[in-house]
Each structure stands twice: as structure tokens, then as C-alpha cells.
Amino acid sequence: MRPSDEQLRAEFCAISGSPISNLRSIAENKYCLILQAERLGRPVVFKKYLSGREDLALIEYQSINLYHSIASDDPFLIDGEAFGHSASDRTVGMTFIEGQRLSDHLRSLVPRVPTGSWTGESPALPLMEKLGGILAKLRSSTRNPGSPLDPFHAEYIRYASQRLRELPFQGRLLFRHAVDEAERLIDAIGAASVIPSFCHGDFVFRNIHTDGRRVGLIDFANSQFASHPLNDMVNLWMALQNMLLPSEFKDALWTSFCRGYGEPDFGPVEEEFFFEYHRRRWLMLNFTATNPLHRLRAYRGYWGFARPYSTRGGRLFA
């Protein structure tokens, strides 16, 4: 049941430690409420989880402030900070990240980069390079050698593989061996010397804002502290491939991103696992969607950028 505005205002004032004004809803779903307000003369955002684990607000609070630790002294990053949270109320308060979604920014550049006539220059390239640098900094500051990956990774690739196998038509035709292949991937990454680290968890263009030459991250609701940079990298790569942009522009964007990250500190075992993790997740979400256009998109992806890793003929991040 949705709390009343009076209840929310009381919770948010307690978290912020100061009065708030102009409270208004900006997003609501069955999982959380997201509201904007004014605090100390500045716009802020409050997120209240309605379901899920009780530590979600704490994890998001810690994740935002981890990002703040690298963004606060970088003039090319849009800074963000969490100023309070309540575990009992499942609520976190944070500063408002200004700017335009990077997905909208990239689409706005399409008329200037038509296929076959692009000059190889774009204001988006340094933004992508900066994004790669963000992941590299998060990786270096949160590496945890000797610790295991969060078991959620194995659980989810099993789940997605089973859902694909159970599809009434596509399952028999395209995903007959998906469950067995998932177990092979889980065994392989379990036997590898994987060093876990932080990941944003939903590192896609709608959760990246740009303001001129700066970029900033929002929505740390799915972040994990025992994950891997490939979790974010593959997620972003698949989001980029799904966008209707000129292919040479997408290639240049990705090259810039990889240049920003630097030398890969992972091998083909990790790359295959996280590629299949996100490939299966993306295909599952689109093949099971009620919108027929999403199902058509799934077929397009399956025979294109979302084909099996073993058939790609080369690594993405070599």
C-alpha cells in the first residue's frame, strides 16, 4: 500500500535532517517510489523501496557515495551524493543529477553522423572514454581478491536459461541446450581466478546523464559489491548495439569506451560468462514481452549482436 504524502514527508525530513519542500512524484512502480523535493535550496531525490530485501536502501546509499568518492574531484563528472538513508523505512535520500540522458544525446547526434559520411569526430566520444574511466576507477578501488562472486550471478543465468528453454517454440529451436550450457559457464567461472569488484548493475544509457562535456551516473538500485566490471561493460555494449545508430558511429563509441577503461584485467572465461549472462537476460526479456515489436527485436538480436558467444569469432574486449 502506498504511504500517504504526509507519511512520506515525515520520513524524508527525518532522513534529510532538515525541512523539505515542493515534494512531488517523478516515478512509481510496484518496487519503489521516486520523489523529488527541495532541500537547503537544492533539488534532491528520495527513493522508497516498497518490496525486496531490507538492505536495498543501504546498498544504494553506499553505492552512490562510492561514486561520489571518484566524482567529487573530477571536473568532467557530474557529482552525486547520498545524504541519508533509513533501513527501517527502506528509503534513501540523494542529490539530484542534472543533465540529459546519454541515450537521447546520442540519438540527437544521428543527423550529423549519417552512414557513410561520418568524419570520425563527435562530442560523444570523450564522454564514452570518460565512462570507461569511471569503471576502471571503480574496479581499482573495490577489487577484493580471494572473495567469491555474488551467488546471484549463477542464480540469474540459470533462471534466464530455464525461461528461454521453456519458450513454447523458440525454446526447442534455439535454446535446447541453454540450461546445460549455463551450468558449464557457472563451473568455468567458479574455477577461474576471478577478482570480484563493484558494479553499477544497470549501466545503460538511460542511467547515464550528460551535461556538455560531463557525464554522471544515476540509479544504483541494482549495484553489487561482489560483481565484476564486465557486468556493466557487456550491459552497456548490448544497449549500444540495440540502438538504431550508424554502425561506424557505434564502433567509434565503443572504441572510445574501451580506451577509457584501459588494459583489460580479465580473461575470456569471465568475458564469455558475462556476455552470456546479459545475452540471455536480454533475449529472455524480449522473447517473453507482450509487445510483438519486442519479440521481433529479440529475433533481430539473436541473429545479430545477441548470437551465442561461441559463434562470435573473437573477443569484445581483447
Image (tube, rainbow, N blue to C red):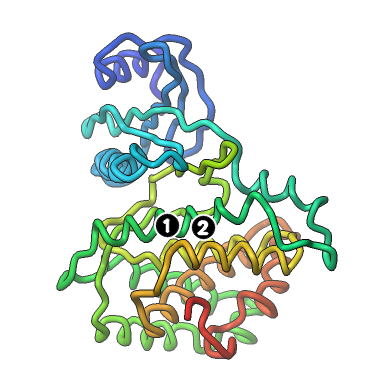
Horizontal and vertical percent position of residue 1:
41, 28
Task: Tell me whether circle 1 and circle 2 mark residues in contact (CB < 8 Å).
Answer: yes
Residue 218 visible somewhere in the drawing: no
The answer to whether residue 264 is left or right of residue 169 is left
Is 93 or 165 nearer to us in this picture? 93
Q: What element carries label 2?
A: helix
Is 152 or 278 nearer to us in this picture? 278
The quadrant where residue 308 appears: bottom right
**Residue 129 numbered tag:** 2
Is 183 or 238 nearer to us in this picture? 238
Q: Is mark 1 on a helix, strand or loop?
A: helix
Vertical order, 50 against 12 (above or below): below
Q: Alpha-carbon neighbours of circle 2 within 10 Å: few (<14), some, or many (≥20)?
A: many
Q: What residue type is labelled 1?
A: Gly
The answer to whether residue 10 is left or right of residue 231 is left
Is 233 or 69 nearer to us in this picture? 69
Residue at 59% x, 69% y is 283
The quadrant where residue 293 appears: bottom right
Residue at 82% x, 51% y is 111
**Residue 133 numbered tag:** 1
Residue at 50% x, 89% y is 177
